C-alpha cells in the first residue's frame, strides 16, 4: 500500500513539472558529443525532451550519440532525432529544433559543450520564483591553457537594465545556458536568420529580452563552453570574411529592429553597431582584405555622425588615417603594439 502511494505521488510530481525541451544541433562533433549527451541524459530534472538535428554531419557523431543512448534506456522515449537532407547551417538547424520541440520551456545546448547535471533543475527553480520568461546561468570557457569564468552575470538587474547592458556588450550574447519560455519565440515570430551562422545568437537574444516580462539569473556555473574545437565557427572567424560579413549583417538586423523602439535602446544599439563595424574594419586590414575594408567602411560612413565619437572619429586626423586603406595599413604595427600593452596592463 505504501509503495502504491509513493508511486502515485511520484506520477503527480512528474505531471506538475513543466516539460523542458533541450535543443541540440549536430555537425562535426564526433570528438565531443558523447560528453555532451551524457551530461544531458544525467539531468536531475525528469520531465525533459531531447531534440537532436543532424545537419548532414560528415563524421560519426550520430553513431556516437546512438551508442551513448544505449546506456540510458530510461531516456530513449524522450529523444527525437531529425536529419536535414542537405547541410543548411547552424541557423537553419536551430529553426528546425524550434519547430519540433513541445516543451513549455527550452534550452539551447551546443553539441561540443557540456552542462552540469542539475542545470535544468536550477534554472527551473529560479524561473518559478518570479514566473520568469528567461533565466540565465553562468558559463565556464575552456581554452587549451586555461579556464575562464563568465565575468558579469547581470544578477540583480531588472529586465530593462539587463537589455541595455546586453546592448552595451557588458553581458554575453550567447543563447546557450539560458532557459526560455517557448512562447517568447512563437508569439513574436522570432526566428534564426538562415545564412547567419556566427553571431546568430545576437539576432535573437535582444528580441527575446525585449519581449520578456521577467528574467532571472542563477549564480552558479552550469555550462561549459568548449573553445578548443578547431572546426567551430568561432575558431574560423578571424580568417573568414564570409563569417565576418555575417557578424555585420546580424548587427544591421538588430539595429533595424530597434529603430522604432525606445530612444535609449535605439541609441545604445547604434553605439554598439558602429563599434562592431570598427572591429571588423581592423580585421579586414589584418587580413589584407581590401574588398572587405571597402564594404565595412561604407557601412561606417552611413552611421549618424553623432556616433562617430564611439570609435574616435570625432578626431579628424584619426578619421582621415583610418578612412584610407593604405594609410590605415601603415598604422597596424602601432595598433598591435598598443593592444599588447593594454593586455599586459590588464
Image (cartoon, helix red, strand yellow):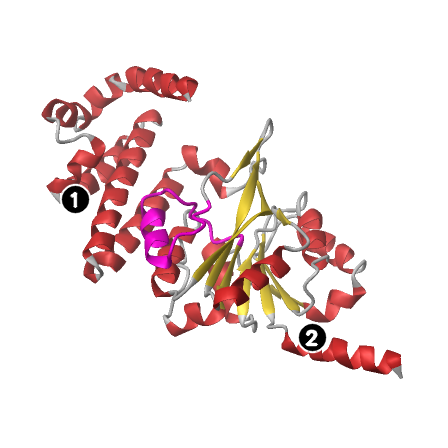
- Residues packed near mark 1 inside 10 Å, few (<14), some (14 to 19) or many (20 plus): some
Q: Is residue 322 magenta?
A: no
Q: Residue beneath label 1, please?
A: 303
CB contact under 8 Å: marks 2 and 1: no
- Is residue 70 positioned above or below 35 on the image? below
Residue 14, numbered label = 2
Which residue is more in the foreground, 87 or 277?
Answer: 277
- Counting from the top left corner in percent of width and height, residue 230 is at 56, 36
Q: Quadrant of residue 171?
A: top left
Which quadrant would the N terminus be assigned to in this image?
Answer: bottom right
Do we see residue 97 in this rendering?
no
Gap between marks 2 and 1, in whole Å?
A: 53 Å
Q: Which residues are magenta?
A: 153-177
Quarter of the image with the C terminus is: top left
In the image, residue 22 sits, relative to residue 174, either above or below, namely: below
Residue 55: percent from left, percent from top: 56, 57
Amino acid at each position: 500500500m505504501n509503495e502504491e502511494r509513493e508511486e502515485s505521488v511520484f506520477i503527480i510530481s512528474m505531471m506538475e513539472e513543466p516539460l523542458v525541451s533541450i535543443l541540440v544541433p549536430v555537425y562535426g562533433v564526433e570528438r565531443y558529443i558523447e560528453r555532451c549527451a551524457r551530461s544531458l541524459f544525467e539531468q536531475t530534472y525528469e520531465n525533459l525532451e531531447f531534440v537532436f538535428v543532424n545537419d548532414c554531419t560528415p563524421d560519426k557523431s550520430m553513431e556516437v550519440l546512438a551508442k551513448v543512448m544505449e546506456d540510458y534506456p530510461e531516456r530513449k522515449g524522450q529523444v527525437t532525432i531529425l536529419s536535414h537532407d542537405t547541410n543548411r547551417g547552424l541557423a537553419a538547424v536551430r529553426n528546425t529544433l524550434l519547430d519540433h520541440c513541445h516543451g513549455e520551456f527550452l534550452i539551447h545546448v551546443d553539441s561540443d559543450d557540456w552542462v552540469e547535471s542539475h542545470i535544468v533543475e536550477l534554472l527551473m527553480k529560479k524561473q518559478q520564483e518570479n514566473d520568469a520568461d528567461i533565466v540565465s546561468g553562468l558559463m565556464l570557457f575552456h581554452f587549451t591553457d586555461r579556464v575562464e569564468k563568465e565575468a558579469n552575470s547581470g544578477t540583480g538587474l531588472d529586465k530593462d537594465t539587463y537589455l541595455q547592458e546586453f546592448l552595451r556588450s557588458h553581458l554575453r550574447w550567447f543563447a546557450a545556458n539560458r532557459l526560455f519560455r517557448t512562447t517568447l519565440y512563437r508569439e513574436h515570430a522570432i526566428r534564426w536568420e538562415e545564412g547567419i551562422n556566427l553571431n546568430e545568437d545576437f539576432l535573437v537574444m535582444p528580441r527575446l529580452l525585449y519581449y520578456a516580462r521577467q528574467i532571472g539569473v542563477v549564480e552558479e556555473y552550469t555550462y561549459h563552453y568548449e573553445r578548443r574545437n578547431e572546426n567551430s565557427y568561432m575558431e574560423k572567424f578571424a580568417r573568414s570574411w564570409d563569417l565576418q560579413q555575417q557578424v555585420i549583417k546580424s548587427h544591421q538586423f538588430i539595429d533595424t529592429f530597434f529603430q522604432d523602439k525606445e530612444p535609449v535602446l535605439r541609441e545604445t544599439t547604434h553605439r554598439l553597431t558602429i563599434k562592431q563595424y570598427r572591429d571588423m574594419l581592423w580585421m579586414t586590414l589584418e587580413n589584407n582584405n581590401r574588398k572587405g575594408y571597402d564594404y565595412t567602411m561604407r557601412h561606417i560612413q552611413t552611421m549618424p555622425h553623432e556616433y562617430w565619437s564611439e570609435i574616435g572619429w570625432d578626431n579628424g586626423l584619426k578619421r582621415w588615417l583610418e578612412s584610407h586603406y593604405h594609410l590605415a595599413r601603415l598604422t597596424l604595427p602601432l595598433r598591435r603594439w598598443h593592444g599588447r600593452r593594454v593586455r599586459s596592463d590588464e
